[in-house]
Structures are given as C-alpha cells and as structure tokens.
Image (cartoon, rainbow, N blue to C red):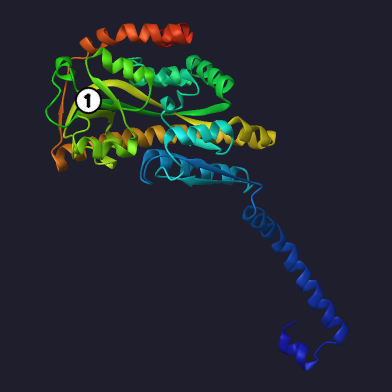
C-alpha cells in the first residue's frame, strides 16, 4: 500500500495501520543483523597499540597494517590495533620496556635494544650466525626459533609472535670505502648501546660509539662518528647515504626483528582471540618478509642509480676469524652454546 492510498482512505484505518506495522517490523528484521555487526565493530572490546621506529612506507609498517586489519576482520571487530610509527612513542629501548611492563601491547624492534634488561636479547646480534637467507628463515621458523622465543618469554614477559626482518646489514663510511678489515682500524662506528655489538666491532679494530638512532645522521655529518652499520631500507629512508656514501657488503648480519607482544596483554584476551592473534601474526610475518626483501632490492638500486652511492664487495673471512672468539665467549656466558650450535646445524 502506498502513502497516497492511505491518505485517500482506500483501506480501513485499522488495516492500514497493521500493514504499516508489519512492513516496519520486516524491515527491522532484515536490517538488524547488519546493524548489530556495525555496532559491534564500532565498539571494539580491546583497543591495542603497537609501535615501530620508521615511516609508514617501511615494510614494518606495512606488515603491522596487514596484521591490524586481519585481526580486526577475524575478530569481527572485537580487537582494534592502533599503529604508532616514526618513534613517536619513544626509542626502541623505551618501547621494548613499555611492552615488557605491559604499557604497550606490541612492538617490532631490534632485540638488542632490550639487552639492558635481558642480555639474551643480544643473541641475534652475533655476526655471521646465518649462512644465507634460506638458513635464516629455516632456523627462525624451526626448533631454534621456538626455543629462543620460550626463553625470552620466560625471562622478560614478552612473547615473540613472529620473526620479521631478513635484511642484510653492511658497513657505511663517510670518508673512504672500506675495502678490507684493515680499513676498520680506528674507525668510529656508530652502534646501538649493546655490549655484544661493542665487543664484536672492537675485535675488528673499530672504535664503537653508541649513539641514539635518530641522532646518527647528524653524528656522521658533523664528524662525531665515521660511519655506521645498517640495512639498505633504513639507510635509504633515513638518508644516511648523504653523509656516508660508501657501503661495504660485509653482510655480517641477517636481521632478526621480532614482533614482540606483552604477555600481560595476551593473557587478558579470551582463548579464541589469543588464537586469532597468533594465527594472524604468522600470516603477517610472511607478508612482511616478502615486503622487506622487495624493499631491500629497490632501496639498493635507488641509492646506486639515483644517489651515486658506492657499494663494494669485501672479504668476509678475516671478519669471521676476528669475531669468532667473541661469539663463542658470548654464547657460553649466556648459556646459549647449544642454541648457537643448533642453528649452525639447520640444513
């Protein structure tokens, strides 16, 4: 029945009223499931926060955005994850401390930033641990990675829910190319504040100089340090190639950048949401690794072709020989000799 028919009185009033009520009721029944879902997604039960140190076009941010969407979709809106990029919640050391304390829910970070409160977090800073990228991946996704994650959770209250990274790190220099290990002698090398990394680079003749990441560009430009070590995406994004246009392919480290989650946060979630977070973290890990590999290739090509950055190969064997005693002593002091051996035995 149309409204004009009702106005003309073409049907008795009581019949018209019943028809309108029935029509409205049917419309509400059809709309209610959609409305309920929309209302549920508009008011998440858990609003969680994650942080990282780079810009929004960085692979970490892309991986976190993928993760946040997957978790929100798979939880039917019960979990919302807000991403804070560019170090706005603090340095890597500060954000790791926040996750440890339960004040922040997730972080992707260089684990060495947490070495002051758990020396085992320095483990993956050991140079020349992985033979190649495939060995890196198999080690982290297999028994050694699971064993390490259990150790860190027990020591820190932080869960490793994905191993991100995979980029190779090289040495940048401001004044001249590093063509051999002899060129490292006396070089003031910017490092994160990590006892292991300090000892590693002392062993090759450098003068380790701990400086905050965001202060590194100015430190190289002003001559406070003579260079740094980092991966190509970070070098390009932070424009470190401007003060340091020489890059030696030491490939001393395939980065391990865990996605940490506060165990306090994890334990607050009901079991079904815990499983969603873990499953989606696995998918986000695959996504981020692919994005990081592609970004590394693109960053290196851009720096060479557009900014005239000079890359050079270098004999790694003297570096391996010089740092081996540091590696052996460190693993022994941490009680991680068996873990190191198990990684070396992964085929």
Q: Point out residue 77 in the picture as x, y percentages from the top left corner.
A: 62, 49
> In the rendered image, which quarter contains the C terminus?
top left
**Is 7 rendered above or below residue 100?**
below
Residue farthest right in this picture: 14
> In the rendered image, which quarter contains the N terminus?
bottom right
Residue farthest bottom in this picture: 8
> Would residue 26 appear left or right of 128 to someone viewing this image?
right
Q: Quadrant of residue 286?
A: top left
Residue drawn at x 86%, y 86% is: 13
Q: How many discs mark residues in the rendered view?
A: 1
> Would residue 134 appear left or right of 83 to someone viewing this image?
left
Q: Point out residue 237 in the picture as x, y percentages from the top left corner.
A: 29, 42
Q: Residues within 10 Å of mark 1 (few under 14, many from 20)?
A: many
**Foreground residue, 282 or 324?**
324
> Would residue 26 appear left or right of 105 to someone viewing this image?
right
Residue drawn at x 72%, y 84% is: 2
Q: Quadrant of residue 216?
A: top left
Identify the residue under disc 1: 188
Q: Mark 1 falls on what kind of element? A: strand
Q: Point out residue 117 in the picture as x, y percentages from the top left corner.
A: 50, 24
Q: Point out residue 160 in the picture as x, y percentages from the top left corner.
A: 52, 27
**Foreground residue, 272 or 9?**
272
Is residue 282 at all visible to an observer of this figure? no
> Would residue 258 appear left or right of 319 to someone viewing this image?
right
**Foreground residue, 326 or 225?**
225
Is residue 170 at all visible to an observer of this figure? yes
Residue drawn at x 64%, y 50% is: 44
């Amino acid at each position: 029945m149309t409204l004009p028919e009702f106005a003309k009185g073409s049907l008795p009033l009581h019949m018209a009223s019943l028809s309108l009520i029935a029509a409205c009721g049917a419309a509400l029944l059809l709309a209610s499931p959609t409305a309920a879902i929309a209302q549920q997604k508009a008011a998440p039960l858990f609003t969680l926060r994650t942080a990282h140190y780079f810009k929004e076009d960085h692979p970490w941010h892309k991986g976190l955005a993928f993760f946040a969407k997957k978790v929100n979709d798979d939880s039917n809106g019960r979990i919302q994850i807000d991403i804070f990029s560019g170090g706005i919640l603090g340095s890597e050391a500060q954000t790791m401390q926040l996750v440890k304390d339960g004040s922040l829910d997730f972080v992707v970070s260089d684990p060495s930033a947490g070495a002051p409160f758990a020396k085992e977090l320095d483990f993956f800073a050991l140079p020349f641990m992985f033979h190649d990228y495939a060995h890196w991946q198999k080690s982290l996704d297999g028994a050694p990675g699971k064993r390490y994650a259990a150790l860190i959770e027990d020591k820190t209250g932080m869960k490793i829910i994905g191993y991100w990274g995979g980029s190779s790190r090289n040495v940048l220099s401001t004044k001249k190319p590093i063509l051999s290990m002899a060129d490292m002698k006396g070089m003031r090398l910017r490092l994160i504040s990590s006892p292991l990394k300090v000892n590693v680079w002392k062993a090759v003749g450098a003068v380790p100089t701990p400086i905050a990441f965001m202060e590194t560009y100015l430190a190289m430009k002003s001559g406070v340090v003579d260079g740094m070590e980092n991966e190509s995406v970070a070098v390009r994004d932070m424009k470190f190639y401007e003060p340091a246009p020489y890059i030696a392919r030491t490939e001393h480290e395939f980065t391990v950048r865990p996605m940490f989650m506060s165990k306090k946060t994890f334990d607050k979630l009901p079991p079904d949401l815990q499983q969603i977070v873990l499953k989606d973290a696995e998918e986000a890990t695959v996504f981020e690794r692919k994005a990081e590999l592609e970004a590394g290739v693109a960053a290196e090509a851009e720096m060479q072709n557009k900014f005239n950055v000079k890359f050079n190969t270098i004999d790694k064997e003297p570096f391996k020989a010089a740092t081996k005693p540091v590696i052996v002593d460190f693993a022994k002091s941490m009680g991680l000799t068996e873990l190191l051996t198990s990684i070396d035995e992964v085929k």
